[in-house]
Amino acid sequence: MKILITGVNGQVGHALMQELIKHELIGLTRQDCDLTNLDQIRQVIDQHQPDLIINPAAYTKVDQAEDEPELAFQINRDAPRVMAEKAREYNIPFIHFSTDYVFNGEKEAAYVEDEPTHPLGVYGQSKCAGDEAIQEVGGLTYILRTSWVYSNIGHNFYLTMKRLSQERDELKVVADQIGVPTSNVFIAEQIKRIIPQLNQNNTGVYHLVPDGSCSWYEFAKQIIGHTNPQFHLEHLHAIQTHEFPTKTKRPANSVLSNVKIKQVFDLNFSDWQRCLSQVIAEEQ
């Protein structure tokens, strides 16, 4: 199968290129295809004529998006719409990655797929608009929402905590926001299992996260405890969101229910702790 993958320098794109190695892969970087150039997206897809398009590329700077709304919407709404249109034209599946930020986080239980969306900031609004645009186009489209993505590459919470625990004696981490840490390796492994099952009867929106949930503080504790035995965990302090102000409000509850995707595609997931251990082991 010929698979076109965007954003291969990013966390998810990088993992997909490694996991789907048995397929014929067309990996696109920003240099290969500028997602703000809609004609270039069309040309690249026409040129390669893939059997499947996967779009992990996105504008993900949550706070910066408040100052660059046009750019965020170009990359997160307009580009995916064009990809969905080309996928429909060629009658091929299109897998697009979305986010927990489409919800406002005020619900107490885990979010299911058909829950009303209420994004809090420009980033969430742009991703939500992208999901809606793809659904309007229709065809063999799959929107996979994930959360708290981390890996051994790029900029993410996992690498930040590892670095800060080496640099500082004390750390403060927010404990009143909960979600599901999701590794790029976990995502890529599940995509590999899902691809052979794609058909017109299972299109739609799915939540792709491991089992379990935790706070940022609990996540940090696991990361540091397993990667830096020299750091004294009593010096890792739990704080409240208001003690760590950010330009954009974050959802207090980012927990996504993964029941639907497991049932539809007959998948078995590990919990987030085991996924974290896998990422740490790969670095050893």
Image (cartoon, rainbow, N blue to C red):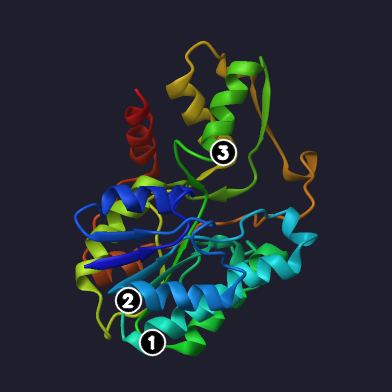
Residue 231 % position (x, y): 55, 14
Is residue 73 shown above or below 108?
below
Assign a secondary structure to mark 3: helix
| Residue pointed to by mark 2 | 49
Identity, as a three-letter code, of the amino acid under mark 1: Arg
Q: Nearer the viewer, mark 3 or mark 1?
A: 1
Is residue 61 shown above or below 137?
above
Identity, as a three-letter code, of the amino acid under mark 3: Phe
Is residue 173 shown above or below 188?
above
Classify residue 51 by image quadrant.
bottom left
Q: How many marks?
A: 3
Q: Nearer the viewer, residue 46 or 156?
A: 46
Is residue 230 shown above or below 279?
above
Q: Which mark is residue 88?
A: 1
Badges 3 and 2: C-beta atoms under 8 Å apart?
A: no
Assign a secondary structure to mark 1: helix
- Measured Cα–Cα span from mark 3 to mark 2: 36 Å
Q: Residue furthest top?
A: 230
Q: Nearer the viewer, mark 2 or mark 1?
A: 2
Q: Which mark is residue 212?
A: none
- Measured Cα–Cα span from mark 3 to mark 1: 36 Å
- 22 vs 176, left or right, is left
Quadrant showing the C terminus: top left
| Residue pointed to by mark 3 | 157
Residue 193 % position (x, y): 23, 60
